[in-house]
Image: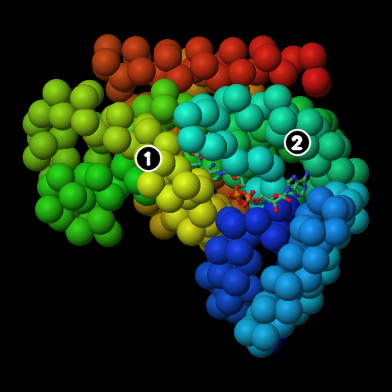
Amino acid sequence: MSKKPVRVAVTGAAGQIGYALLFRIASGEMLGKDQPVILQLLEVPADGPQKALKGVMMELEDCAFPLLAGMEAHSNPMTAFKDADYALLVGSRPRGPGMERAELLAVNGAIFIEQGKALNAVASRNVKVLVVGNPANTNAYIAMKSAPDLPRQNFTAMLRLDHNRALSQIAAKTGKPVAEIEKMIVWGNHSPTMYADYRFATIQGQSVAQMINDQDWNANVFLPTVGKRGAAIIEARGLSSAASAANAAIDHMRDWALGTNGKWVTMGIPSNGLYGIPKDVMFGFPVTCANGEYKVVEGLAIDAFSQERINITLAELLSEQDGVKHLL
Ligand code: NAD
Ligand code: LMR
């Protein structure tokens, strides 16, 4: 094992996403089969979650993962994030049936102020941060604004689950393998207003939009199915998605760290003003990744239908941002 271990902080480590995530990070699925990791696990200080975290760590130990170079349990972000190279901010309350994710801002927003400040104080200056806890875009925005000494582009929000959901719906509709679909995009907020856009998508070079050629299906079946998939899972499982969320987090971090070889993926990132999205709004964009950095796919034509959808999801994000102004 020649590579130096990297430090991966995970919050909410004893929660349901944590349980589906940690074993895959430790087995090398996120950062590569040659990259040793040290897990720095954060849970709330209460006895129950700390005890559950100990149990998860016992199981991690029992896997004897060759890449697991160390692990630590923490109850304070100031120690959990010390020198972290990667931070997956999962810990926060999930919604229940009948709730929208934005309703969680009141309970979860404060977590990301404290954790943004802690990252600012103690994490590696190159830390790559992924916010999973909902509402993910605005929580990532809060964390970024609470960490003024870190580069803003280091803060990202998870739109990858929506991207993967869109891929599966297109695969089912076209009868083609999911692996052959390229150039999918999900614009905007991780909420029902997200705009999953397959206008540029291809399967073996053929246009998906032409293959499907059904705007009614797009507007009335595809978009609501992808946009409300989280709620459908809560309804069916009684709990919010966990394994698919952990899988999306692995995909997001792996692609950011190791590159996409020119493939488009969706990441929630602070806008630089492209596509008319105001600077700093944490927005789902199509990106490619190389050398540890993401780059927005530029120059895509936005038609009237798409502009209308983008405006709706942007307006929602601006109103969420406005709602947390007083906290920042
Ligand atoms: P969970 O309740 O099973 O686990 C959350 C864990 O976080 C708990 O163990 C809790 O003790 C811990 N926690 C709470 N506050 C914390 C804090 N300040 N610091 C550290 N740990 C803390 O929930 P879950 O199912 O794992 O979901 C976690 C979050 O992820 C929820 O907000 C959920 O809505 C969100 N989520 C997002 C996506 C996405 O696509 N962005 C997908 C699925 C779930
Ligand atoms: C999801 O999309 O599955 C998660 O954001 C959980 C939720 O509340 O929908």
Amino acid of disc 1: Ala
Residue occupying the point 80% across, 21% down: 328
Q: How is the image coloured?
A: rainbow
Q: CA distance from mark 1 to mark 2?
A: 27 Å
Mark 1 is surrounded, within 10 Å at the Cα level, by few (under 14), some (14 to 19) or many (20 or more) other residues, namely some
Residue occupying the point 22% across, 44% down: 170
Q: Which residue is mark 1?
A: 232
Amino acid of disc 2: Phe
Q: Of helix, strand and loop, which one carries label 2?
A: helix
Q: Is residue 243 left or right of residue 147?
A: left
Q: Of helix, strand and loop, which one carries label 1?
A: helix
Image coords of residue 277 (percent x, y) = 51, 18
Is ligand 1 less than 8 Å from the beta carbon at label 2? no
The answer to whether residue 163 is visible is: no
Is ligand 2 less than 8 Å from the beta carbon at label 1? no
Mark 2 is surrounded, within 10 Å at the Cα level, by few (under 14), some (14 to 19) or many (20 or more) other residues, namely many
Q: Is residue 94 left or right of residue 196?
A: right
**In the image, residue 268 above or below residue 250:** above
Q: Nearer the viewer, residue 125 or 322?
A: 322
Q: Say whether disc 1 or disc 2 marks the residue closer to the N-terminus.
A: 2
Q: Which residue is mark 2?
A: 112
Q: Nearer the viewer, residue 17 or 180?
A: 17
Q: Which mark is residue 16?
A: none
Image coords of residue 261 (percent x, y) = 41, 57
Image coords of residue 322 (percent x, y) = 67, 12
Please identify the quarter of the rendering in which residue 14 is found: bottom right
Image coords of residue 296 (percent x, y) = 48, 36
Please identify the quarter of the rendering in which residue 279 is found: top right
Q: Is residue 300 left or right of residue 218?
A: right
**In the image, residue 145 above or below residue 260:** above
Q: Quadrant of the N terminus?
A: bottom right
Please identify the quarter of the rendering in which residue 272 is found: top right
